[in-house]
Structures are given as structure tokens and as C-alpha cells.
Image: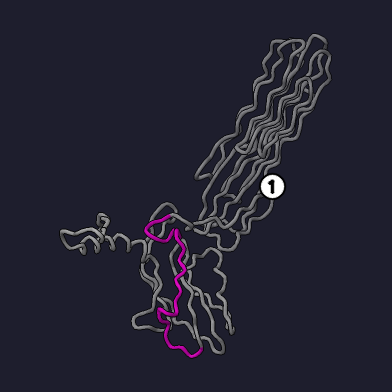
Amino acid sequence: MTVHTYGSIDFNQPNTGSPFPTLNGDLSVLARLAAAFAPHETAPPSMAVTLDAGALFVAGAPVEVKAQTSATIAPPTANPRIDRVTISPSTGLLTVTAGTEAANPVPPAVPAGQLPVAQLRLDVGMTAITNARIRDERVAPTGTSGGGSGTAGGLVGIQTFTSSGTYTPSAGTASVVVELVGGGGAGGGCAATSGAQGSAGSGGSSGSYARARLTTGFAGLAVTVGAGGAPSSAAARGNAGSASSFGTLVTAPGGLGGMPGYATSPGIIVGGSDAGPASTGGNLVNTAGNPGDHGLVIGLTAVVGGNGGGSPFGGGGNGGGNTPGYNGLAPGAGGGGASSIAAGTARNSGAGANGLVIVYEYSA
């Protein structure tokens, strides 16, 4: 459409020329927003309703929608009825939802995932729906006008999986954003020590993380929530966590286990766990997990196991200070390494935390 520079008109002040060119231009600026999906009678009036053209902002791109007219709407047979006109926030196509006939009718609920446009008051025996019968109920901002970004593609619901299951979309879901983190790896266990030795395991790494937006093929998919790695005992490497997945579309591998702490003289650093493999299928984010921290045998009175790697959802388990390691705290976080000193016993590491899958449901 032709654009115009908006100009304010003060009709209380003297004008040196006609205000109408400016006024007409201003109206053309406003029309793009004000007339978007405006409901009105057909020409000539009939038992249908017309919506003016409008625009949507869907998946990062503007979508122009042409003017459209509903199918013929049957009048009520015994009592008045109120029907509702809505549009899809992803296509802009109109839908007419019939209400229930009653002496004092009420409009039907707005269908899930739709945007309200108008109510139609219908009486027995009527032959045309005129403007007097149409109640405009467009809501601003709706995301339907002028490329706005209000509720078009709005959040329908959130499903959080802390254990494996099947994803069933909520009504009105047109696309999803999925977040996954694999199970965290356990920290490394530590060996028993003599009076002149210490031992310290490193922390386990966090599970890998993925984020993906999906517009098709997501309904009914199997959801797998990866288990955190089980604690290891004595001088054994921590167990790795297992992968979280959303069907076969997105996979977030589990974190690796921490390195074991062997009995040794002080002054030793036990290398931290490596990050696990990066996620796959995350068209928004694919990352590997955070590695676990080093275990330290500093002296005959100072040892500490490595902390577990933190996940995007929070921190890992603390390393033990002459104690077992601590379990990972947040979903997907690694467990802490164990440590012993001065004739200490062998100790278990901290477990990795289980993974997590979150599905954000959108109407476009």
C-alpha cells in the first residue's frame, strides 16, 4: 500500500490551506491497523459475514491475508442464537462457531488457539446479517494487524517431562519449542588411603542441551528422559548419564562420569571429566555438557573432590571434602567427586541428576 507521513491536524488553529489532503493521508496510515480483519456485512447483506484483509506475523515473517467471506450461516429455528467469528493466528482464515439457541443466548467460548473477531446476533426468520447484528470484538494487540506480534503464535501450554512418556499436544497447538537436557554424569569415586596419602575424584559432566522449534511431526512422539549416572564406589570412574530425546528428532546425550581418585601422595590434581558429545536436532541450540571440575589432593590435611558440571537449569553436586561426593542438584547436572585423606576409607561419588524435557506449545 502507498505510505504517508502522519501529520497532526489542530482544527482549533487557523489553517492556511485545506486540511483534507493531510487528513486523507493520515487515514490511510491508520487503515492498515484499524481495518485489519474488520468484520462487516456483505454487499449486499446476506446470511454471511465479511472480514477485511489483514496481516499476521508468523514464524518471523509477515503473512498477508486477503479479504474473506464466511459460508452461509443458517438462522436459528426456535430461539435467538449468538455465533462467534474467529481467525487462526497462523493462517488468518476465519471460522464461525455456532452458539446455542436460547431465550437469552450467550456466545460460545473462543476455540482454543483462535483469535476473537466478532459476535453475530441471530434471530429466528432473519434473512440477512447486517452491521447492526455484528459486534466487533477484535482485541488489540492481537498480532493480526499491520505485522504486529501480539498473541499470534501465543503460548498455549507447557508440558514438563521428568520421566519418560508420550507427548500429546494440547488443543490448539500448531508448533512447539522443545528443550532437552541429558542425564548428568556421576562424579568419580575415591580409593582408601594410608596416613601419608590422599585421594580425590573429579566431578561428572552435565548432560548435553538442545533447543528446537518444530512445526510438524511432533504429535504422539515418545519422550525419553535420560537417567543420571549412578554413583561409583572406591577408585572407579563415575557412570555416565543417559540421553534424553524427543522422538528421533532431537537428542541430548548424557554427561560423562568423573575420573577416579587413586591413593597418592599430596600435590596431585585429578583431571576433570570431559564434556559429552553435543546434542543433535536442535535447530535453535545444540551444545555439549559442561565438564566436571578437577579433584585436588593438596596436602595431608586438605583434599577436595571436583564439583559436578552445571546444566542450563542449575548447579552440579559439590565435591566431597574428605567425604563422599554430593548428588547433582539441577536437572542434567553432574555429580561431585569423592575424596579421602589420612587413612580414610574408600568413598562413593555423587550421582548425576536425571535429565529433563520441556515442551512449550504455541498456537502458530
Local packing at callout 1 (Cα closer than 10 Å; few below 14, some 14-19, many 20+) is some
Q: Position of residue 363 (x, y in %)?
A: 52, 59
Relative to 288, 22 lies left or right: left
Q: Position of residue 35 (x, y in %)?
A: 36, 66
Vertical position of residue 266 compared to residue 5: above or below: above
Q: Front-most of 193 and 42?
A: 42
Relative to 236, 85 lies left or right: left
Name the residue located 75 percent from the left edge and 29 percent from the top edge.
326
Q: Front-most of 73 and 176?
A: 73
Magenta highlight range? 124-148
Q: Name the amino acid, label 1.
A: Thr
Vertical position of residue 196 compared to residue 134: above or below: above
Mark 1 element type = loop
Name the residue located 37 percent from the left edge and 83 percent from the top edge.
45
The residue that label 1 is drawn on is 162
Q: Is residue 146 magenta?
A: yes
Quarter of the figure with residue 132: bottom left
Q: Front-most of 167 and 359?
A: 359
Name the residue located 26 percent from the left edge and 60 percent from the top edge.
12
Quarter of the figure with residue 337: top right
Q: Is residue 98 magenta?
A: no
Relative to 98, 341 lies left or right: right
Q: Position of residue 347 (x, y in %)?
A: 80, 24
Vertical position of residue 246 compared to residue 100: above or below: above
Name the residue located 57 percent from the left edge and 49 percent from the top edge.
178
Vertical position of residue 264 compared to residue 217: above or below: above
